Image: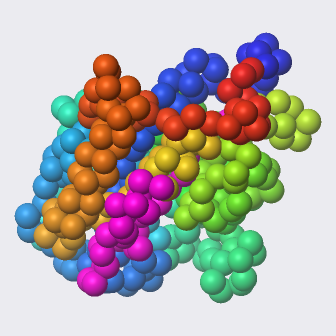
């Protein structure tokens, strides 16, 4: 395959540079951390948000220590609560007891720790509805947003990207709430404000076979959520509506069972986490493993311990494979178990 034959917005080298990041940290933090509801109704007041030992730098430092090269933070999840002081709503951190610009601190911490920052913004907003109807109300795939919400989302995303134009990745979650015309407009808006940023319209749960333009297009990246890529391996060469595109894959999974911090949650076994990492990487996808800082604003010890055990075990495997070139944290994200010939062919490794 060659770049001359393909139609992606970004160059092949830019997309392959993103693929070389290999391993990242997903960070779910927000009002759901405090009201205990993943799909939060967004009714808790800002006063409920009180992470009194907030340590954003510590989150990002852990990513680096674990061998990760990038991180993605939920700037706004379904509660609608914003982790930055937005001009367009009063439902944000600036009106909480801990009025810290979490997004700003996160991006600064990433730069300081040598981690590429990314942000997550969902189109399903239970607080700022402006007459919108969601999938829970109407059935999956039938939810929609109103022109007033589109204007609100445009303003917020522009605000974020004007402040942070050099992000590595920007998620638009639940784009199935948006019609095709608005998705294209929104994609172009993000691309114009952050030209080198990789844009991901997240379809959510899927079987990891191909890009479906029905509800998550256009996009630069493809997300696999709570599932590993199929056994053929992800093929980044995707034909969408008759045109060829190079679209890398990102698989996101949790360290425990929940996205946000939840009382009683606990880490998956080392064997399961390592299996998820290896399967994801050998099937030609980046691995994005999630943590959920607790209500103090710190990473729970069990999450930290799980990531560092995983790091140490992978480094041991690297060294065992090549004793003359011992494993290291710096090279951990490059370590990919060998693909089968079938997976190599499917994934385009031999292009």
Question: With respect to residue 58, does 330 lie above or below?
Answer: above
Question: With respect to residue 100, does 160 lie above or below?
Answer: above
Left/right placement of residue 320 relative to residue 192 reads: left
Left/right placement of residue 218 relative to residue 261 reads: right
User: Residue drawn 21% across and 41% down?
Assistant: 65
Whether residue 4 is visible, yes or no, is yes
Whether residue 123 is visible, yes or no, is no
Question: With respect to residue 80, does 333 lie above or below?
Answer: above
Q: Position of residue 99 (x, y in %)?
A: 15, 61
Q: Which residues are magenta?
A: 247-275
**Residue situated in front as seen by the camera: 335 or 143:** 335
User: Residue drawn 23% across and 51% down?
Assistant: 308
Question: With respect to residue 324, does 65 lie above or below?
Answer: below
Left/right placement of residue 143 relative to residue 251 reads: right
Query: Magenta includes 260?
Result: yes
**Residue situated in front as seen by the camera: 105 or 248:** 248
Which quadrant of the structure image shows residue 110? top left
User: Residue drawn 34% across and 57% down?
Assistant: 27
Colour theme: rainbow
Q: Residue furthest left?
A: 53
Q: Position of residue 36 (x, y in %)?
A: 33, 83
**Residue situated in front as seen by the camera: 307 or 28:** 307
Where is the N terminus found, in terms of image quarters?
top right
Where is the C terminus found, in terms of image quarters?
top right
User: Residue drawn 38% across and 26% down?
Assistant: 322
Q: Position of residue 126 (x, y in %)?
A: 49, 76
Which quadrant of the structure image shows residue 136? bottom right
Query: Magenta includes 350?
Result: no
């Amino acid at each position: 395959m060659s770049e001359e034959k393909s139609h992606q917005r970004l160059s092949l080298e830019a997309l392959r540079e993103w693929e070389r990041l290999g391993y990242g940290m997903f960070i779910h933090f927000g009002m759901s951390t405090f009201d205990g509801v993943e799909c939060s109704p967004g009714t808790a007041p800002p006063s409920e948000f009180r992470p009194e030992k907030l340590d954003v730098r510590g989150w990002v430092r852990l990513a680096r220590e674990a061998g990760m090269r990038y991180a993605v933070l939920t700037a706004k999840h379904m509660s609608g609560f914003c982790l930055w002081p937005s001009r367009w709503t009063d439902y944000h951190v600036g009106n909480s007891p801990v009025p810290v610009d979490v997004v700003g601190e996160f991006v600064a911490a990433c730069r300081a720790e040598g981690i590429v920052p990314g942000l997550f913004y969902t189109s399903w907003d239970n607080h700022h509805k402006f007459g919108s109807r969601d999938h829970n109300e109407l059935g999956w795939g039938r939810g929609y947003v109103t022109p007033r919400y589109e204007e609100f989302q445009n303003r917020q995303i522009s605000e974020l990207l004007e402040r942070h134009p050099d992000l590595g990745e920007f998620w638009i979650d639940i784009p199935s709430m948006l019609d095709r015309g608005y998705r294209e407009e929104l994609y172009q808006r993000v691309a114009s404000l952050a030209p080198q940023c990789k844009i991901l319209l997240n379809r959510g749960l899927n079987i990891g076979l191909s890009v479906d333009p029905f509800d998550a297009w256009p996009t630069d990246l493809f997300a696999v959520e709570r599932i590993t890529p199929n056994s053929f391996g992800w093929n980044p060469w995707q034909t969408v509506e008759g045109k060829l595109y190079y679209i890398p894959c990102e698989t996101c999974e949790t360290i425990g069972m929940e996205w946000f911090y939840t009382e009683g949650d606990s880490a998956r076994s080392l064997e399961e986490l390592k299996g998820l990492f290896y399967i994801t990487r050998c099937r030609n996808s980046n691995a994005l493993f999630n943590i959920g800082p607790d209500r103090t604003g710190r990473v729970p010890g069990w999450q930290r311990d799980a990531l560092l055990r995983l790091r140490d075990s992978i480094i041991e495997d690297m060294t065992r494979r090549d004793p003359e070139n011992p494993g290291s944290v710096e090279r951990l994200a490059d370590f990919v178990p060998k693909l089968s010939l079938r997976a190599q062919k499917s994934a385009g490794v031999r292009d």
